[in-house]
Amino acid sequence: MTDDAPELDPRDIATAGEYVLGILPLAEREVFQRRLLSEPALMAEVARWQTHFDPIADEVRPVSPPAKVWNEVERRLFPELSPSVRPVRLWKWLSTGSVLASTALLALLWLGQPGPDAEPQLWVSDMVSADNSIRLTALYDETDGEMRVSVAGQPPAAGRDFELWLIQGDRAPISLGVMPHEGQAAMPIPEDLRILVANATLAITDEPAGGAPAGIATGPIVAQAEMRRI
C-alpha cells in the first residue's frame, strides 16, 4: 500500500487509514477532510485504504446484537451512571473516535457479532509509535486462543522486521512472532501461554529479518500498550 504513494509522509498514510476506519478525533478528522480537498495524493491514499478494507466489510453479517450485550457494555463503561443516562453517554463515547471504540469495531469486523447466547471474551491492545508512523492493533479471543493483528503505517527498514512480545509481570518478554509489514495476520497462542495474556503488555521491537536471535529482544521498542478487556 505504501509503495504506491512514496511521496506521502508515513504519518499521513497511517492517518488516512484511521480516517477510513472512522477513528480520528473530530478535530483531527475535520482538518484531514480540509486537506483532502487540495491534496490529490492524500485522496488517492484514502481510496487505497477503502479498497483495502472493503473485503473485510463484505464479510460482516448484518446481525443486531442482543440487548444484554449493549447493557453490559454500558454497565462496564459507565458504572457510575443510572441506566437511563448510559445510552446517551455511550453514543458520545463512540463518536469521539477513541482507541477503545476503534478496537471494538475491529473485533466485530474480524470475529463477527456475538450470537444471542455468546459471552465475548476479547482482549485488545492498540500500539502506536511515538511519532504515530506505525500502528499495530492486536485482538485476542479467549474462546479459541487466537490472536489477530492489524499492521499499518511505515514498514521496517530493509533487512529488519517488527516482532511482537508478550510481557507479563516480572517474566522475561516472550516472542509471539514476526509481524507482517502491513495488513492482517492471525496467530494461535500456545496453550501454556494463554493464561498470561489477560492484563499483559504487548510490545513491538525492531529486529533483524526473521526475528530476534535466540528469542531475546535486541532492537528498540517501537510501541507498547496493555491488553484491555472489551
Image: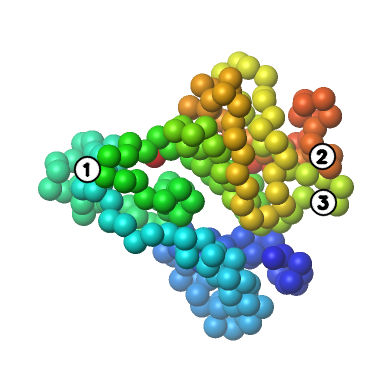
Q: Position of residue 176 (x, y in %)?
A: 66, 33
Picture residue at 78% right of the left edge, 44% below the top: 161
Q: Which quarter of the rendering shows the N terminus? A: bottom right
Instruction: Label 3, secondary structure: give it.
Output: loop
Q: Which quarter of the rendering shows the C terminus? A: top left
Which one is earlier in the sequence, the residue at label 3 or at label 1? 1
User: Closer to the camera: disc 2 or disc 3?
Assistant: 2
Indicate the amino acid at tag 1.
Answer: Lys
Picture residue at 51% right of the left edge, 42% below the top: 139
Q: Observer-nearest residue: 102 or 131?
A: 102
Q: Observer-nearest residue: 212 or 53?
A: 53
**Residues tagged 1 and 2 counted as in contact (Cβ below 8 A):** no
Indicate the amino acid at tag 2.
Answer: Gly
Q: CA distance from mark 1 to mark 2?
A: 45 Å
Residue to which mark 3 is pinned: 157
Q: Position of residue 205 (x, y in %)?
A: 72, 38
Picture residue at 59% right of the left edge, 35% below the top: 188
**Number of numbered tags placed on the structure image:** 3
Residue to which mark 2 is pinned: 210
Indicate the amino acid at tag 3.
Answer: Ala
Residue to which mark 1 is pinned: 68
Q: Residues within 10 Å of mark 3 (few under 14, many from 20)?
A: few
